[in-house]
Amino acid sequence: MNATLIRTLLAGLVSVVVMVTAASAVADNRQNLKKEALTSDRLPDFTSIFNWGLKLNNIKEWYLFAGIAAQNPDFSIVDPGDYVSQTTFILEELDIFLAENDLTRDDIIRIEFTLVEGFSDEDFGAILGQFAGYFAEVPVKPAAGTLRVVSALAFPGLVVEYEVWAAR
């Protein structure tokens, strides 16, 4: 499947809430949050990256991480204009940020993607590959988030930004 088709599918379908009866995976994290993946044979299979829906039980706390970008504390931009490198940096920093808040990848329930216009099919494919690798060991992947394509982010040179929802 080419990246243009994936982009079209994600942009058009990612916000769809799908109610289905079949579940592909169920997992408990260390705080007894129960995550159940909701799937459908009528939608493309992206389960290496995300699920079309999640059923959540026993939520004790919600965490919303806003607009994580490839930016250092001094506001300098990491690899300006490089979609793949910025995604790598963000995912590495996300693990640190999660740990600082006593969370893990297993606690992530949704990610919102924002990309600046101009990325190539190769960039997009590499980004999806990074997310597939990032969540490879997570038994129940996060629910699909919305992919936004914008003309610019807050600082020149930033080209990707991810919002992360977590629960436990």
Image (cartoon, rainbow, N blue to C red):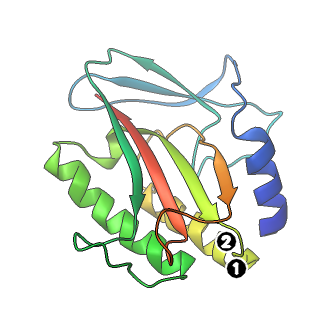
- Find residue 54 and report its image quarter: top right
Q: Is residue 33 left or right of residue 165?
A: left
The residue at the point 53 percent across, 60 percent down is: 132
Query: In the depicted view, which residue is nearer to us: 102 or 66?
Result: 66
Is any part of residue 1 visible from this angle?
Answer: no
75 or 160: nearer the viewer = 75
Residue type at the position of mark 1: Glu
Tell me the element at label 2: helix
What residue sits right under mark 2 in the picture? Answer: 125
Neighbourhood count class around disc 2 (C-alpha, 10 Å): few under 14, some 14–19, many 20 upward: some
Instruction: Report the quarter where the C terminus lies.
Output: top left
Q: Is residue 128 visible?
A: yes
On screen, residue 140 above or below 88:
above
* Quarter of the rendering occupied by the N terminus: bottom right
Q: Which residue is mark 1?
A: 122
Mark 1–mark 2 CB contact (< 8 Å): yes
Mark 1 neighbour class, 10 Å CA radius: few under 14, some 14 to 19, many 20 or more:
few
Residue at (69% x, 75% y) in the render: 119
Q: Nearer the viewer, residue 43 or 154?
A: 154
Q: x and y percent of residue 44 in the render?
A: 78, 45
User: Height in image: 89 above or below 136?
Assistant: below
Three-letter amino acid code at the position of disc 2: Gly
Q: SS of the residue at dot 1?
A: helix
Q: In the drawing, does residue 168 fall left or right of residue 148?
A: left
The x, y position of residue 159, in whole percent, is: 55, 71
